Amino acid sequence: MKNKLALSISLALLMGLSGCSGDDGTDGSNGTDGQDGQSGLNSLISQSTLAMGDSQCVFGGTAFNSGLDSNSDGVLAENEISQTSYVCQPNPVSQSGSSLPYSVLRNDLTDGARPDYQFEIRNGGYGSDAAADPANKNRFYALTDRGPNAVYTGTMGAGKKFPVEDYTPRIGLFELQANGDVKKIKEILLKRPDGSLISGLPNSSSLGGTGETPYDAEGNPILVDNSLPYDEQTNPLKLDDYGLDGEGLVALSDGTFWISDEYGPHIVHFDAEGKEIERINAFADDERTVYNLPAEFANRRANRGMEGLTVTPDENTLVGIMQSTMHNPNSSVKNLDITRIVTIDLTTGEVGQYLYKQEKAQNSNSGIVALSAHQFALIERDGAFYNDTPSAMKYIYKIDLSAATNLEAISDSGDILQDPALGLTISGLTLEQVVLEQGWTALESAGIVPASKTLVADLVQQVSYPHDKMEGLWLIDSSHIGVLNDDDFATWSTDGELEQKYLDAGLNRVDQNTLYILDNLDLTTSE
């Protein structure tokens, strides 16, 4: 009876409450519907090793993937990954760089710096330029110049000693290893169109030669037949119109190469085996050319020709830069800071030309690589050794041509004329003469604007760069770039005497091709 009474009282109370006339309370929000099958799902983590050259980790590393095991099979499938994080390996190349391998060309000559020793001429020499291998992110190509040589004046005038006179300029393919070592994969010897090997000996004067006499290691003129005496007609100096002093290198995705040099300057296209396909230069009478540079480029300063060459990302336009001020019209303008950049559209032959203003007179622009169609990374350096000259200048700039003046697009107007031999002139003066006599402000007044530039790296500050030359740029990605020095085959000279090329006053450290990789650079572009 007690339970029934309690139940009756409870029901009466509930009925009384439901009959009250007060306001209803606010409804609560609906809860989120549950998902079928989610109850008790496990979170999974997987990891994978990233190889060298990976887009996320340029030097390799580890990718960590996480997500829910939606099918409950205990395996994190690709479609179950919701988050990926990366742990990248650090730059494996130390601050002191990584040396390239070399062989010895000869070691029987007395070292002019240490007469009690004989020195090594090394092969070596892969520092004139570098270019990324389009097919492998871990690899780069590197270029030699004409071979071991040294300034010398002998019985037949000023010239060069060539202690390995039959040296063939070449391209090397190198691979960066995970531990930072550099391995040579192969080398490609450069050849004439008929497949015969070229040399590094000078061209004849009609094709860019500057009258340099080639001498052997003992100072004897190199002749067509060294067993016979010199005769201007029957046994002249040995020259080579296919000879190259290569300085700029482009590696295309089709396996072919373009090389610019200091003799013509010539820009030569080689196939994957190193055989010449075609060439570009400033000599209209050269029947080998497919296109011609503006005639004023033939006024290049000896040994300071087209030191840098690159190609735009679409591989349609070559872009070259002269090392220093051209002798335009003559050597009176030598001590200046004005250099020229040339562009050649490979599909049309259309040429553009721009100016670059160096930081100080007679600096060298010795490497260039395209970041976009109009932005480039560029080397500007002096010729000093940091160990001897703490103020040595070894810079990488990012330059932009988009707002620079294309000299080739300027039409004749008043005192501004396009001279067929000297290029754009103002009041009869070449642009070099204008800068010499009136300064850069005179060009600005004429509406001529050079390439803009932003400092990206100072190698003296960043790696205490010990070499005199930095010439090769290997673009790795938008924040990493490799830099190569030219070791001159470890060969130097003083007053015409051949010697080992040393980096220190104590004559203990021999210069050697060395790769440096710079991190955390801003090589991004506006495109």
Image (cartoon, grey):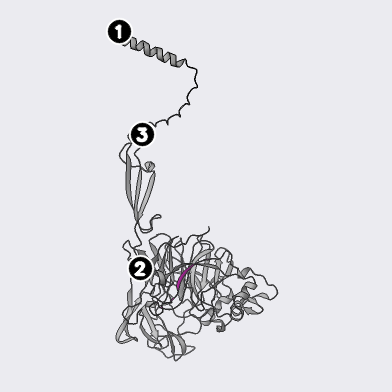
The residue lying at 47 percent from left, 16 percent from top is: 20
Residue 485 picture location, percent across and down: 40, 73
Neighbours of disc 3 within 10 Å: few (<14), some (14-19), many (20+): few
Q: Which residue is mark 1?
A: 1
The residue lying at 44 percent from left, 80 percent from top is: 201
Q: Amino acid at mark 1?
A: Met
Q: Which residues are magenta?
A: 384-405
Q: Which residue is mark 2?
A: 95
Alpha carbons under labels 3 and 1: distance apart? 50 Å
Residue 27 visible in the current orientation: yes
Mark 2 touching mark 1, by CB under 8 A? Answer: no
Q: Is residue 278 left or right of residue 49?
A: right
**Which of 208 and 277 lies nearest the eye of the viewer?**
208
Task: Identify the mark nearer the N-term, 2 or 1.
Answer: 1
Residue 503 picture location, percent across and down: 36, 78
- Quick one: quadrant of the N terminus? top left
Q: Amino acid at mark 3?
A: Gln
